[in-house]
Image: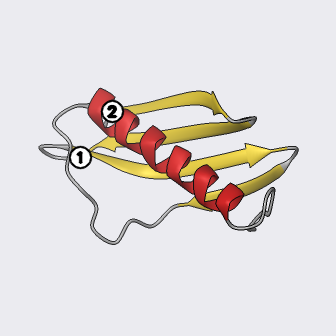
Amino acid sequence: MKKMASSICYRGYEVRVRCTEEKYHWAIVEVVVTKEDVQTRATEFNLRPRYVSGEAALESGQTEGRRMIDEQLDNGGDQRTR
């Protein structure tokens, strides 16, 4: 089983994404958003979309991480969820 990971910075946060190759597709395993040693983690995806490549899965995970950050900042400034 192949694995891929990426890390980007967005609005002062770090977004890390991990994905794995399953039988005929790629799936996101984990999205972690970190700022100052506080993490918000998304590890269970109800509708685990299937991606044709690891790059597509990582890009989608990065988009989800940015959405999580925007949601946190829109809900009261720098509010963090653990």
Look at the picture and state if 7 lies above or below 81. Answer: above
Residue occupying the far left of the picture? 24
Marks 1 and 2 in Cβ contact (< 8 Å): no
Look at the image and name its color scheme: secondary structure
Q: Secondary structure at mark 2?
A: loop
The image quadrant that residue 48 belongs to is bottom left
**Quadrant location of the C terminus in the rendered image:** bottom right
Position in image of residue 74 (x %, y %): 66, 60
Q: Residue at x 38, y 48 (%)?
A: 28
**Quadrant location of the N terminus in the rendered image:** top left
Tell me the number on the disc at residue 62: none
Q: Residue at x 34, y 72 (%)?
A: 46
Position in image of residue 54 (x %, y %): 30, 31
Number of numbered discs on residues: 2
Q: Residue at x 59, y 28 (%)?
A: 8
Mark 2 sits on what residue?
A: 2
Residue occupying the far right of the picture? 36
Mark found first going from the N terminus, 1 or 2: 2
Tell me the crowding category of disc 2: few under 14, some 14 to 19, or many 20 or more residues within 10 angstroms, Cα based: few
Position in image of residue 77 (x %, y %): 79, 58
Q: What amino acid type is highlighted by mark number 1?
A: Glu
Query: Label 1 to label 2, Cα distance in Å?
Result: 8 Å
Please state if 74 lies on the left or on the right of 35 as rendered.
left
Q: Secondary structure at mark 1?
A: loop
Mark 1 sits on what residue?
A: 22
Q: What amino acid type is highlighted by mark number 2?
A: Lys
Position in image of residue 14 (x %, y %): 68, 36
Please state if 35 lies on the left or on the right of 48 as rendered.
right
Q: Residue at x 44, y 42 (%)?
A: 63
Please state if 81 lies on the left or on the right of 49 as rendered.
right
Residue occupying the far bottom of the picture? 46
